[in-house]
Image (cartoon, grey):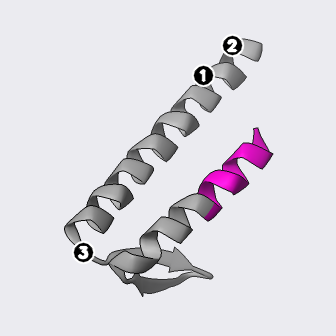
Amino acid sequence: MKDMESHCQDILNSLREAVTEALETKRRLGQYAVIVVDGQPRRIPAEQIEPLISAAKAKWIGSV
């Protein structure tokens, strides 16, 4: 069972890393990002992506 939990955590970490990289690329290119908040799509301007990434990372660290 521990191996499964470890495997799932590895998958989750990979997904988080991929999403962070994609958002960072959009920010550098000056593109907006679309995310889902409370079931509704929201357009996030490029200049607001960095705080979004920072907040998500802080949340992820607390969940590990």
Q: Main secondary structure of the magenta part?
A: helix
Distance CA(mark 2)–CA(mark 3) = 39 Å
User: Measured from the top left, where is residue 60 in percent x and y?
Assistant: 68, 49
Labels 1 and 3: the sequence-earlier one: 1
- Quick one: label 2, few (<14), some, or many (20+) residues within 10 Å? few
Q: Amino acid at mark 3?
A: Gln
| Image marks 2 and 1: residues in contact by CB distance under 8 Å | yes
> Circle 2 sits on which residue?
3
Q: Amino acid at mark 1?
A: His
| Nearer to the camera, 13 or 3 | 13
Q: Amino acid at mark 2?
A: Asp
For residue 29, above or below residue 14: below
Labels 2 and 3: the sequence-earlier one: 2
For residue 30, above or below residue 22: below
SS at circle 1:
helix
SS at circle 2:
helix
Residue at image point 46% right, 42% down: 17
> Circle 1 sits on which residue?
7
For residue 21, above or below residue 27: above
Residue 1 is at least partly visible in this image: no
> Circle 3 sits on which residue?
31
Q: Which residues lie in the magenta part? A: 55-64
- The picture quadrant where one finds residue 34 is bottom left
Residue at image point 35% right, 57% down: 24
User: Measured from the top left, where is residue 57 in percent x and y?
Assistant: 62, 52
Distance CA(mark 2)–CA(mark 1) = 6 Å
Q: From the viewer's perspective, tell me whether residue 61 is left or right of residue 55.
A: right
SS at circle 3:
loop
Residue 5 is at least partly visible in this image: yes
User: Measured from the top left, where is residue 3 in percent x and y?
Assistant: 68, 13
